[in-house]
Amino acid sequence: MDSVSESQRTLYPYVTGSSVVAIKYKDGILMAADMGGSYGSTLRYKSVERLKPIGKHSLLGASGEISDFQEIMRYLDELILYDNMWDDGNSLGPKEVHNYLTRVMYNRRNKFNPLWNSLVLGGVKKGQKYLGTVNMIGINFEDNHVATGLGNHLARPILRDEWNENLTFEEGVRLLEKCMRVLLYRDRSAVNKIQ
Amino acid sequence: MTKQHANWSPYDNNGGSCVAIAGSDYCVIAADTRMSTGYNILTRDYSKISHLAEKCVMASSGFQADVKALQKVLSARHLTYQHQHNKQMSCPAMAQLLSNTLYYKRFFPYYSFNVLGGLDSEGKGCVFTYDAVGSYERVGYSSQGSGSTLIMPFLDNQLKSPSPLLLPAQDAVTPLSETEAVDLVKTVFASATERDIYTGDKVEIVILNASGIHREFMDLRKD
């Protein structure tokens, strides 16, 4: 009985996405991720969309195991569906979705069967910008700029230096492109196609 | 077939230090705002302090996801208590609740090192210090977290806690005034920041006294 439960737990990630980088800018959130899915050290898939919109207000970016990301999308689709079905004029904002994801990730970790992802959740609701992140053991926080995986080491220092409150859209895009370029040079699992 | 061991750990240490000092009619609780993992800083602006009840504040360092879950469980229990008893939980009651909650997960612990500070039912300051599985003690001052090994000896020296073996039992509460205690806390964090890599960025200081709750921040070294 024990061996059955062992084989159903995630032990290693198989198809993985590399980093996601996101910043708050003057009018909202900017997020970037490349479109590669690596199977170990082979670049297996070159058109994986790792950024997905959630409801009317949020954007989710994921790095790590792609199949777990698709599972998370199924959970979130159900969440948004129920929210729409209430038809009460209120819709789930980024803070609520982030909280839901944190609870999901934490509870999976408690059962020793984690979703092997680091997630970035950003959005704007009623003019309020929100940018947060959760990782596979449930660590979560929000900040003005976040990155997952190698992006934490390579992109965050650039962002700490050059980020300010009033970035325009063009400046924000340029800043993110700079980060993605550094990641392309130095991260072996990055590809040159970006979403 | 041998059982495979997980190649990942469900715990992580996000660092940080917490301090609490009890006075005759106030309590000072402070924690830094840095969240780190390994040798990286995740964010510089993360609050480790949670205002559980009107006269009761908890500061926790350790594994942040467990700390968050613990804070949520305690807030929910406090809300239930308020509905059932039509009053706020006192600090000693919250202290017992925290101990029980931690021991409940004795065999998969909350990796959370807590200090609870507040005013008891007589209005005197009280500080309770915990380990990760719930053993607790009421003291006059305490520190937990990555900087506690640096901070605790300094507090012992400055606040001269009386030995618990003395008779008649002496009060551990410090005779310092509120502003002196806050200054002591600021000094303590500035020193801990110098030598502990997980402590720094900012310190959030919460002061609880008869007139309510007051919060202030002080910048610390960012390296």
Image (tube, coloured by chain):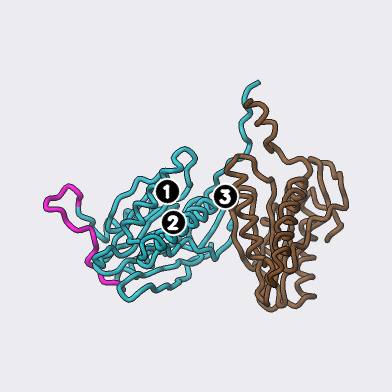
Chain colours: A brown, B cyan
Tell me how far mark 1 sits from mark 3, CA to CA: 28 Å
Q: Which residue is mark 3?
A: B38
Magenta span contains residue B164? yes
**For the residues carrying marks 1 and 3, which lies nearer the camera in this image?**
1
* SS of the residue under disc 3: loop
Considering the whole magenta stretch, tell me its main secondary structure: loop
Badge 2 sits on which subunit? B
Badge 1 sits on which subunit? B
Residues beneath discs 2 and 3 located on the same chain: yes
Position of A89 relative to B104 (above/below): below
Tell me how far mark 2 sits from mark 3, CA to CA: 33 Å
> Please, which residue is most extreme toward the top here?
B1
Density class for disc 3 (Cα within 10 Å; few <14, some 14-19, many ≥20) is few
* SS of the residue under disc 2: helix
- Residue B101: image tag: 1
- Name the side, left or right, on which B115 lies relative to B220: left
| Residue B147 position within the rendered picture, expressed as x and y whole percent measured from the top left | 42, 54
* SS of the residue under disc 1: helix
| Residue A116 position within the rendered picture, expressed as x and y whole percent measured from the top left | 69, 45
Q: Which residue is mark 2?
A: B77
* Residue for point 42% across, 48% down: B101
Seen from the viewer's position, the closer of residues A88 and A46 is: A88
The kind of residue on which mark 2 rests is Arg
| Residue B197 position within the rendered picture, expressed as x and y whole percent measured from the top left | 50, 55
Mark 3 or mark 1, which is nearer the start of the sequence?
A: 3
Seen from the viewer's position, the closer of residues A173 and A47 is: A47
Q: Which residues are magenta?
A: B163-178
Find residue A151 and report its image quarter.
Answer: bottom right
Whether label 1 touches label 2, CB < 8 Å: yes
Position of A80 relative to A188 (above/below): below
Seen from the viewer's position, the closer of residues B148 and A74 is: A74
The kind of residue on which mark 1 rests is Thr
